[in-house]
Image (tube, rainbow, N blue to C red):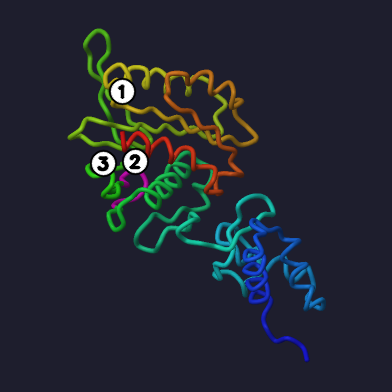
Amino acid sequence: MSCKKPNWILLKECGERLSRDGIVPFTRRQLIDCVHEEHPEREEGSLNPIIQGMTVNLKGGAPGSIGKNIFYSVGRGLFECFNQEKHIFLPKENELVQLSERTKYTEDYIRDFLMDILYRRIGLEGTWKGSGKTTSFNLKDEFKGFRCFAERSLPYTLPAGEIISHASDILISNNESGKYISIEIKHRSSVTDQFKCRSYDIFHLKKSYGSNLLGIMVYVKTTTGIRVEHARSLCYFFDHFFGIPFESKDAPVSWDRLLLVVKDFLKS
């Protein structure tokens, strides 16, 4: 008697079985082979687009599987069963900004994406306000008094005494304690002067705020743009430099080190 279960159910059951067996992450090949163990009649050409449509952070796939958030892609051809607390998910309707295809490859996209990560990892639920450059939220109670802002300015003083402001791509601040985290984002940049300008600003911010300010540079590198090593050498005034390949940015592990240094500073 033939099995009447749809392909996406069989793939879901196989993903759960592989996870129970400790095979995490698993590959497309492992999912398909698992289905074929009991259902060799299910064609590989039909299963592949189903896997695509069942995966939260991948686009396309078979229409009948889209919206069934079962898998999460953690690398090229690598998957885990989706866990909303562990994985970065699409913004909730009416809560977070929805990112359009037109902004997918801009620094604004990376900023909004990182704001989403910060909110889900250290943000206080229900405090998200605004969108894009107006986004802000409170941090969890363990980081009481800190707020996170997109495109927020912080003043610094030049040697001649003139005060000017620098707008951080992301600023985590606590005005009461006078502690700040300034996060700068560069993406696919081919101009070294852009890194030099950021280094100039962080140098003077550090001069003005000392150890009360943590400077972080994030360089999301695509196939174009200057080398990560060259960008890092230009950003030596920053406390931390993170070079993240664009194709890895959707994997939560790519942001773990950044989250760790942010949490360490907030708790210090």
Structural distance between the alpha carbons of marks 2 and 3: 14 Å
Q: Secondary structure at mark 1?
A: helix
What number is the disc on residue 150?
2
Residue 30 in picture, x, y percent from top left = 74, 62
The residue at 74%/72% (across/down) is 35
In this figure, which residue is indicated by the disc labeled 3?
Answer: 146
Q: Secondary structure at mark 3?
A: loop
Nearer to us of marks 2 and 1 is 1
Q: Quadrant of the N terminus?
A: bottom right
In the image, residue 178 sits, relative to residue 192, either above or below, namely below
- Left or right of 16 in this view: 164: left
Nearer to us of marks 2 and 3 is 3
In this figure, which residue is indicated by the disc labeled 1?
Answer: 211
Residue 33 in picture, x, y percent from top left = 78, 67
Tell whether position 52 is magenta: no
- Left or right of 165 in this view: 116: right
Q: Tell me where the magenta segment starts and ends, as one range.
A: 129-135
Classed neighbour count for the residue bearing mark 1: other residues with Cα under 10 Å, few (<14), some (14–19), many (≥20): few
